[in-house]
Image: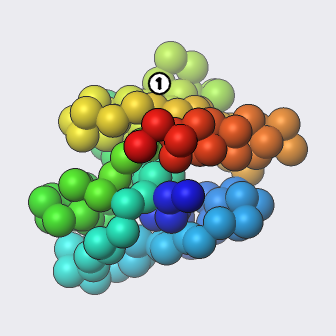
Amino acid sequence: MYDVVYFSSVSENTKRLVEKLGLKTVRIPLKSDEAERFTYDHDSVLVVPTYGSGEEKTSVPKQVIKFLNNPENRKHIKGVVATGNTNFGESYGLAGDIVAKKLGVPLLQRIEILGTPEDIEQLKERLNKLWELQ
């Protein structure tokens, strides 16, 4: 099974979501300079929140961009999960779309904020299927 690499702001909504998965999780640091130096060399799925009210240019958190600017980090991401708020309308989960396209990996799921128990079960199933394909 893949590890889960995620970014969560001080609200820790994404942190609380990934903890529900019961998998090994690794958090991208909050401070941009630390995120830039942070490396993780295990195959993983990236969970990324959508920022900036869903505007494309500000939707991916800066810390995630800095983490992904390292080719060593990018090559280990095998899938993406987007979190967000459906109030963003068509931009709901946009950060996941952007990152998945850029990395050439599947967007596994969009989950609103903390997710429902059904969201978590569905994500576990999708992670298992992704693992089986590799």
What is the crowding at mark 1: few (fewer than 14 residues within 10 Å), some, or many (at least 20)? some
Q: Quadrant of the N terminus?
A: bottom right
Residue sitting at 23 percent across and 55 percent down?
Answer: 74
Dot 1 corresponds to which residue?
A: 91
**Residue 80 picture location, percent across and down:** 44, 42
| 130 lies left or right of 116 | left
Q: How is the image coloured?
A: rainbow
Residue placed most toward the observer, 59 or 125: 125
Dividing the picture into quarters, in which one does residue 52 lie? Answer: top left
Q: Amino acid at mark 1?
A: Ser
Direction top: furthest residue: 90
Q: Is residue 82 above or below residue 41?
A: above
Quick one: 28 or 44, which is closer to the camera?
44
Image side of residue 131 versus residue 37, left or right: right
Quarter that holds the C terminus? top left
| 122 relative to 47, above or below | above
SS at mark 1 in the image:
helix
Position of residue 130 measured from the top left corner of the image (x, y, whole percent): 51, 39
Residue 13 coordinates in the image, percent (x, y): 66, 60
Q: Position of residue 35 (x, y in %)?
A: 29, 74
Name, please, the residue furthest toward the right. 117
Q: Residue at x 73, y 50 (%)?
A: 114
Q: Residue at x 59, y 72 (%)?
A: 24
Name the one closer to the observer, 94 or 58: 94
Residue 102 relative to residue 132: left or right: left
Residue 27 visible within the image: yes
In this rendered view, identify the residue nearer to me: 95 or 24: 24
